[in-house]
Each structure stands twice: as C-alpha cells, then as structure tokens.
Amino acid sequence: ASAYEPADLYRLAMVTDPVVAPDGRRVLYTRASFDISSDRRQNELWLATLDAEGRLLDQRLLVPAATSAGGAVFSPDGSRIAFVGAVAGKPQLFILALADGIARPLGTQKTAPQSLAWSPDGSRIAFGAQVDAKPLEIGGMPAKPEGATWAPAPRITEELVYRRDGAGWVTPGAAQLFVIEVATAKTTQLTSGDTDQINAGDRIEWTRDGRSLLFSAYRGADADLRANDADLWLVPAAGGAATQLTSAPGIEASAALSPDGRRIAYIGGPDAPKFYAMPELWLMDAKPGAGAVKLSAALDRPILAAEWAEDGRSVLAFYNDEGVTRVARIGLDGRVQRVEVPRIGGTRLYLPSSGGGFGYARGTFAYTSAFTDRPAGLGVARGGRQTAAIDVNAGWAAGKRAGRLEEINVKSRADGRRVQGWLLYPPDFDPAKKYPLILDIHGGPNTDYGPFFSVTHALYAARGFVVLFTNPRGSIGYGEAFANAITGAYPGQDHDDLMSAVDEVAKRPFVDGRNLFITGGSGGGVLTLWGIGKEPDKFRAAAALRPVTDWALQTYISDIGAVTWKYWLDGKAPWDDPVHYYNRSPVSLAAKWKTPTLLVTGESDFRTPIAQTEQVYGALKLRGVPARMVRLPEAPHGMGRPSQWLQSNLAVIDWFEKWRVK
Ligand SMILES: CC(=O)N[C@@H](C)C(=O)N[C@@H](C)C(=O)O
C-alpha cells in the first residue's frame, strides 16, 4: 500500500446529491470524479434499487458524464426523472423514462433551469431561470465590418454586483419562474420584472391541487444590498398576480408544504445586526401574513434542509453539529428527537467541512456517507440503521495507507471555552520521531471542519506533516452564541482559540517545536495573516490562501461586500469609520510581519479579489520579508480546476519544506 499522492485526485470518486424515489425503493445519486485529460470535474447520474428493508439490490449508470447531469428529480409516480444537462455547451432540460432508460430533451432553454419541481399529476415542471436583458452599450461606435477582429466589447455595468465568484461577469437580466408542459414542451413564464422575481436556486413547491407555486424571492430593487432578505410568494400556475405570504425583514426560504398543504415549514430567520444569521426551522399556516413559530429553538444548530414526515406531524431536519451533519425529527411542538443516521459526510472534498446531502421518502434516508480516509460514498438507512452502503473508492482505498485521525478538545486561553479540533497523523507515524506541525484554519468564518477525508490534509500528512485543524469561535455547529462570538471582533478571540490548540499540541513529544507552520484559506487566510502579526516568533513559515487582507477593499470589490460591512464590520461603513476597518484588517499588522509567507490566489477570485493578495505581497516585499506569490490564471475562489487545487496544495508543501529547520 502507498501513501496518498497528488495524482490520486484523478483516481477518486465521490457521491453527492442523493434523491430518494417517492416509493422509498430507489435512490438517484451523482458520482463525481476528476478527469485527468480535461482537468475538470465530471458527474455521472446513477440509480440504486433497494428491497423493502432498504438493502441494495443493484445499481446502474443512468446518465454518463458527457451529459453533465445535475438537479435530478423523480416524477411523482417515480417512473421518470427530470434533470438539466448540457448539449454543445448549452443548458438542456431532459426527461428520462426509467422503463427504457432514454433521456429525451424537453424544449429549448437559453439559460440553465434551476430547482426543477414536478406538478403533483406529473404533467408539468416548474423551474427558475434567468431571462437575459440587453447589455449596456456605448453609443456612437461605427459598425464593425463583417469578419473584423476588433478588441472585445467593454463590460459596462450599473449594478453593485457585476461579477460573481465562480459564475464570472454578470449578464444583465432577472430570474423568473417558468412552467413547462411535459407532453408538448409549451413553456409559460409566470413572473416578470426587471429585477429577480424568484431566488432561482431555492426550492419551488407545488400546492397539493397543482394550481399554484410556492417559492422565495426578494423583489426589491435594492436586492444586491439585502443579502439577508427573502420572502415567500404564491403564484397561480396558470398565470396571474403573485401573492406575498411573508414580508418580515429577514429570510423566509426553502419552503416545504405539509402533506395536507395547510402549513409551511421554511428555513431562515429575522434579520438582525449580528455576524451570523443562523438558519432556523419555522412553521406557519399557508396564508398571507400568518405568524410563524420557530421549531428548532431547542436544537440551536443551523438547519441545512428539511422535509416533512409523511404523517405531517414532524419535520426531518438536516443540521450541523460539532463538525458533522445529523438528522433530527422536530415535532410541531418543537420537540427534537435525534434520528440515528450513521455519519453523514461533507462533499467539499478539498477540505474537510461538514455538509453533504440527504434525501428522504417513505422511511428511507439516503445520504452522503463519511469516511476519514476516502471521499463520501452513498449510505441508506431505515429505522435508525444503515441498510445499504456504496463505497465508490473501495478499490482505491485498499491500495492506500492513510494516517490516523484523532479528535482533540482544548480550553481557549481567552476564556476557557472548549475548542474542538482534530489531528491527522502521517501514514507511517512513529511517536518516537519529531514531526513538523501545520495548523490549517478554515474560512467562512461561519463554516466548520470535521473528521473527514480531504485531499489537502491527506497530501500534507503523506508528506510527513502532522495536521491540526480546529473549529474556533465563529464556527457553526456549536450553537448560535458560539458562531456569533466574533461579532464586533473578527479577528479577535478566534485567534486565541487557534493558538491555544497549537500550544496544547506542541507540548506533545512528537511535535518539532522549531517547525510550526500556519495556513488557511479565505477567512482562514485572514487568521493566518493575523496570526503571524500577533505571534511573529511562533511560526517558521505561513501560507495565506485567497485571503481577505483589508476589510475596506473587501467591502468595495468583493461580490459579498454588502454582507461584509452590514454584518461583519458591525454595520459601520468604511467611509464613516475607516479606523475601525483598518484595525480589523490583517494589513494593519504589516509592521510586525517577519514570517516567510506564501500567498496563493485565483486571478478570477471575485470573492476575495486578488488585489488584496497583491497588497500583502507588496507589503512583505517592501519590508524585506521572504514572500512568494502564486497566481492561478482564471481560477475563482474555490481554486478552479483540479490541477489548480493541487498546485495550491503543493505550493504550500514546497514553501514549508523550503523553510523547515532540517
Ligand atoms: C462567505 C464567504 O464566502 N466567505 C469567504 C470569505 C470564505 O472565508 N470562504 C471560505 C469558506 C473558503 O474556504 O473559501
């Protein structure tokens, strides 16, 4: 058996997006992998068939990678599947009849349909999609002669968010709600307006009589400024005016109708001047202006998704809890009962964050099933017991040696708060030897790390580093107060939490105290640069990946600038209180920086744009601190193509090796 190596990324597979058929006897899932020739992620759609006890009978490939299938949903009778694929690079809606396995295109779409929802009788499908508008142009230009090779047209905008990370430069237009008839492909646009009329990626729900559609939208012209706002709307499926069901400032979204259609469970919460808006589960009558009650108060955890139980007496909620994802049954009185579904795995792959996916119908749960030494597979559970498992990496893992993963809990030096974390050991760890230690800090900052496999940590460990990763305050999964403990102070005591973990682990005899390293991405890059400013003598070298370095710059040029100043910088605007912004920015510590520092950022990162990386690189070089900048062409915040992720990982290893005391 061999240790993890970079090319393994192209040999791995991962299960995502499980969907259970209405009869509870079949599961659709996506098998994602990375193609070494095209250097791109590819998705196959698979169908697993179960017996009455939920045991696996067989599985088959439904849609090969070439179609790039996504968003698949079963028809109400379970005989067909609707999904969105791509034909010659253009989005295409398909219907696949399970009887013959043939995927037939339905209609033509200019932009990608999102959130497909079958009508109860299976005759129509609702979806959200953008309707493009004419781009702004500069008047008076001479006509371009036929076949001329002029410079590309300018990009002109009057929007606040004119580029979105991952999606790129924004095409003007508005998201609208559509219904397509499955027999004829006749398509009707149900909403209209110059601004988004629907949150196109959010759940769309048919009323039980098939006459109306329930969806979320924030329809104000100031939508770009209102990141934490969404209301519920109901519109007749045959066309007509939409009725607004909720209007409170805050998020009412992901609405699910009860089986009798009389109540709505939704996810969100009121807008508040605090760092983190924890998504909660709410219940209301399906009537305009009906009051809502919070169902998940006793859980005090972020709700990721929710489905009604068939009897309409409880809601099954998918939530984050101390680094992992769990399922709870929440009664309509708010009583919480844990559902024993074995460990649900995250599907971020590059980093060990929780999350993942789950589907439910007729007592069958399907979920992304977690491992510490390989990416997620498919798990199926019934009656609180795992009944089937598909491990898409079994063959690969059999030839690999993985390091041990250990949970640790330390007390923060700031106030004694418990900080949870994990240590990943090198595969051939020998406690009698000394090892360099890498602290890897997650971003968000309201996300988490958990006890899962990740490409990044597997590579670091395989190259002989012990990897420490923790959930400092600001992380989710430890209650709303913990996630909001950085309100007014980010960075602040989160730094103390991280240093407490490093100090505790550094006491262990196998840690080489001369070789402590610090790294992190995005929000983790913030804390990395903060860390080497606050503790200039602690770390041998640092690697800040796609960091925020200057909160004023971030507010002005990031695609989430409106979130930054309203929620992360205490509602103070950079022009009103530049000192507040400066004091919270890692670049304010530049005079203390002396640790050799690597910077890695995508040149198309529109979340933490590369101007900030350039700022820090300039400061380090001007000060004579050893620094290296790695720029990944065309890569967004998530670091783009698989090889670009590997470049980022290997750049960190190279840098730490260069500075390691031998
Ligand atoms: C909300 C958000 O995008 N935050 C970024 C600044 C961030 O920290 N992202 C993390 C999750 C990352 O690793 O990219």
Image: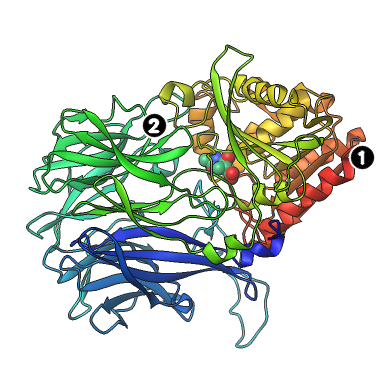
**Which residue is at 17% across, 42% downward?**
264
Q: Indicate which quadrant contains ligand 1.
A: top right
The residues tagged by marks 1 and 2 sit, at their Cα atoms, a distance apart of 46 Å
Tell me where residue 1 appears, x and y as whole percent: 68, 60
**Mark 1 residue type:** Lys
Asked if one can make out residue 288 in the rendered structure from this viewpoint, the answer is no
**Which residue is at 46% across, 61% downward?**
391
* Observer-nearest of 348 and 461: 461
In the image, residue 398 sits, relative to residue 63, either above or below, namely above
Numbered circle sitting on residue 108: none
Ligand 1: does it lie within 8 Å of the C-beta at label 1? no
* Observer-nearest of 506 and 416: 506
Tell me where residue 562 appears, x and y as whole percent: 50, 37
Tell me where residue 470 appears, x and y as whole percent: 59, 32
Residue of label 2 = 278
CA neighbours of label 1 inside 10 A, class few (<14), some (14 to 19), many (20+): few
In the image, residue 253 sits, relative to residue 79, either above or below, namely above
Callout 1 secondary element = loop
Residue of label 1 = 662
In this view, the mark in front (1 or 2):
1
CA neighbours of label 2 inside 10 A, class few (<14), some (14 to 19), many (20+): many
Between discs 1 and 2, the one toward the N terminus: 2
Q: Is residue 211 left or right of residue 642?
A: left
Tell me where residue 478 appears, x and y as whole percent: 45, 27
- The answer to whether marks 1 and 2 mark residues whose Cβ atoms lie closer than 8 Å is no
Residue at the extreme top of the image, as rendered: 415
In the image, residue 499 sits, relative to residue 129, either above or below, namely above
* Observer-nearest of 577 and 299: 299
Numbered-mark total = 2
Residue 55 placement: quadrant: bottom left
Callout 2 secondary element = loop
